[in-house]
């Protein structure tokens, strides 16, 4: 399912609005996803406040990185339905489903996430660059 530019902007704005007006962002020791997986990630917007990544991944592939990897705190906007298996740094395994239009916040973390479904995974990942950034 392709999203129109208008629908994509609406999802992005909804997600940014969900962040609230102030966030306490700790520095994360994270890999740059675009450099680590250039065929799966592309930068769709970047300025001094945010970086917005679009992710596309095949079934059986890592969803937001390959193998065990780290992320800074970020907001995710789900662009289609998918199934995943997440293995956390402490070894906890979680099976989950995500639905088109779902928006969720993730603190900085290290994990392994696999696409266990039959659909291509598509998502926008929004990283804030400045602590206490105000969302308009």
Image (spheres, grey):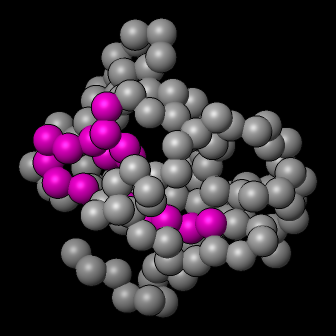
Q: Quadrant of residue 73?
A: top right
Q: Which residues fall within the magenta stretch?
A: 51-67
Please name whichever residue, 62 or 102, is drawn nearer the observer in this view of the structure.
62
Q: In which quarter of the image is residue 109?
A: top right
Q: In this view, does 112 lie to the left or right of 77?
A: left
Tell me: residue 50, above or below residue 103.
below
Pinpoint residue 122: horizontal percent, then vertical percent: 32, 62
Is residue 87 located in the magenta-colored stretch of the structure?
A: no
Q: Is residue 11 visible?
A: no
Pinpoint residue 20: horizontal percent, then vertical percent: 80, 56
Tell me: residue 61, above or below residue 79.
above
Pinpoint residue 18: horizontal percent, then vertical percent: 69, 58
- The number of numbered badges drawn on the structure is 0
Residue at the far left: name it.
118
- Who's the residue at 31% across and 39% down the image? 66
- Who's the residue at 44% across and 20% down the image? 88
Residue at the far front: name it.
35
- Who's the residue at 45% across and 83% down the image? 7
Tell me: residue 42, above or below residue 92.
below
Please name whichever residue, 15 or 88, is drawn nearer the observer in this view of the structure.
88
Q: Can residue 46 be seen in this view?
A: yes
Tell me: residue 30, above or below residue 87.
below
Is residue 64 located in the magenta-colored stretch of the structure?
A: yes
The N terminus lies in which quarter of the figure?
Answer: bottom left
Q: Is residue 100 left or right of residue 20?
A: left
Pinpoint residue 112: horizontal percent, then vertical percent: 36, 29
- Who's the residue at 82% across and 75% down the image? 136
């Amino acid at each position: 399912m392709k999203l129109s530019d208008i629908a994509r902007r609406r999802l992005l704005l909804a997600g940014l609005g969900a962040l609230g007006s102030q966030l306490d962002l700790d520095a994360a020791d994270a890999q740059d996803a675009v450099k680590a997986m250039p065929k799966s990630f592309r930068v769709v917007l970047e300025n001094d406040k945010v970086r917005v990544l679009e992710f596309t991944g095949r079934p059986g592939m890592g969803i937001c990185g390959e193998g065990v990897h780290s992320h800074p705190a970020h907001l995710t906007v789900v662009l289609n339905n998918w199934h995943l298996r997440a293995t956390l740094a402490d070894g906890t395994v979680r099976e989950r489903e995500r639905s088109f239009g779902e928006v969720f916040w993730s603190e900085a973390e290290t994990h392994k996430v696999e696409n266990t479904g039959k659909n291509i995974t598509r998502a926008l990942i929004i990283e804030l660059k400045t602590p206490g950034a105000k969302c308009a």
